Image (cartoon, rainbow, N blue to C red):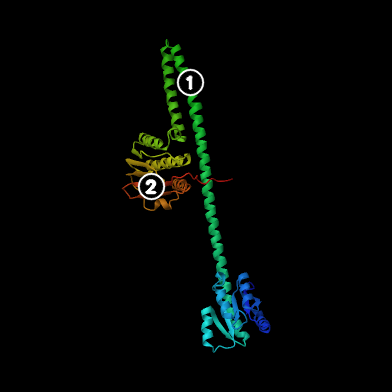
Amino acid sequence: MASSANASVLVVDDDAANRLALQEALSSLGARIVLASSGEEALRRVLEEDFAAILMDVRMPGIDGYTTAKLIRERPRSRNTPIIFMTADLEDMSGTFRGYRAGAVDYLSKPIIPEVLRSKLAVFIGLHDMNRMLSAELAERALTEQRLRASEENLRALAAHLESIREEERVRIAREIHDELGQALTGLKFDIGGLAKACSSDPNVAARTASIGIAIDRIINSVRRIASGLRPEVLDEIGLSAAVEWQAREFSRRTGIRCTADVDPAFSDPDRERSTAIFRILQELLTNVARHANATRVNVSLADGDVIRLRVEDNGAGIEQGKFEHSRSLGFMGLRERVQAFGGTIEVAGREGQGTTVRVVIPNHITQPAVYNA
C-alpha cells in the first residue's frame, strides 16, 4: 500500500529485534521509518521532526511509553500526532485507560500482525499527507493574499508619489504663469497707457489704446484665474481654513449655487500634504455637485482635533445608496485613494431627491503619506 515518501513514522521500542521487525513490516508503506530505543530518544526525535504516526512500546526501561506519550503531547507540533501503543497485555484495563489518557488513538497486541499494522498506519499516513496538502494550499493562499496586499500598498504609494509630483508641477506652472505672464501683461498695459497719453490728441488712437487696455485686463484676470485653479495662492500664503472659505465663495460666484463654509474658529492648519489633500478633495466634491447634483445649496464644514473632519452636504438629487462604494468612476476612486493615503476614511450618504452628504476623516498626525521609492 503506497504512500507519500515525505511522511515519517516513529517506532519506539527498547528491543532491537522488534524495531528491525517493525521496520521491515512497514517498508512497503513507502514512508520513512525512524527508530528510537527509549522514551528519551523518542522525545529528541519528536523535537527534530514531524511524524505522521508514532508506534510506542508500553513497557520500556527509564521513561515508559505512557509517560513518553504524555510528554510528546506537550509539544505543540506533536499535540495531534497519532500514537499507537504496542503491548503484550491488552487485558490490563487500567493500563489501557492510562494509555488513552496519555493520548493514545489505538492499541496493538504483541506479537504484531504486519497486515493489521500496515492497514492502520496507512490511514494515518494518508490523513497526514492530506493535512500537508491542505496546509500547503492554505500557505500558498496566504502568500498570494500577502502579495496582493503588498501590490495594493505599492500601487497606493505610487499613486501618492505621482500625485505629489503633479502637485509640485502645478505649483511651478502656476508660479510661472502668475509671475512671468502676469508681469509681462502688466508691463504691456503700462506701455499702452503711455502710448495713449502720447497720442491723446488723436481720438482714434486713444479709443484704440483704451480698447487694448481693456483686453489686457481681461487676459490678466484669465491668467490669475488659471494660476489659482492650478494652485491657489491663499492655500500656501494663508492656509487651509482660508482656502476653504475662498473656494466656497469662488464656487458660488462661478456656479450660482449658494455655498457656505463653516470653519471651526479653533481650526489649526495641518501640514502641507494634508492641507493639499483636503483642499483637492473639496474641489472634487464641489465639482461633482456642480455637474451631477442639480443642487441649489451646499454647506461645507471643517474641524480638527485628533482627526481632520471635512463635510460637504448638498440638497440636490442625492446619490443612490451603495453607488459610491461600488462605483468605478475615476473621480470616486481618486477620492478614496487620497483619503486612504493618510489612513483616513470617506463616507457618502444620500437619498434620492434629498441630497448627499460626504464625510471625510483624516488622522491629524505628523506621519506622512506613503511615498513610492523608485
Q: From the image, tell me which residue sits under label 1.
A: 188
Q: Using a 10 Å C-alpha cutoff, classify the residue at mark 1 as few (fewer than 14 neighbours), some (14 to 19) or many (20 or more).
A: some
Query: Is 241 left, or right, of 149 in this rendering?
Result: left
Position of the N terminus, as image quadrant, is bottom right
- Identify the image quadrant of residue 298: top left
Q: Position of residue 69 (x, y in %)?
A: 57, 77
Q: Is residue 3 visible?
A: no
Q: Is residue 278 visible?
A: yes
Q: Which residue occupies the foreground of this view, 121 or 298?
A: 121
The amino acid type, in three-letter code, at marker 2 is Arg
Position of the C terminus, as image quadrant, is top right
Q: Secondary structure at mark 2?
A: strand
The amino acid type, in three-letter code, at marker 1 is Leu
Residue 359 got which mark?
2
Q: Residue at x 68, y 84 (%)?
A: 17
Residue 211 lies, with reference to residue 334, above or below; the image says above
Q: Which residue occupies the foreground of this view, 138 or 103?
A: 103
C-alpha span from label 2 to label 1: 47 Å
Does label 2 or label 1 sit earlier along the sequence? Answer: 1
Q: Position of residue 309 (x, y in %)?
A: 39, 45
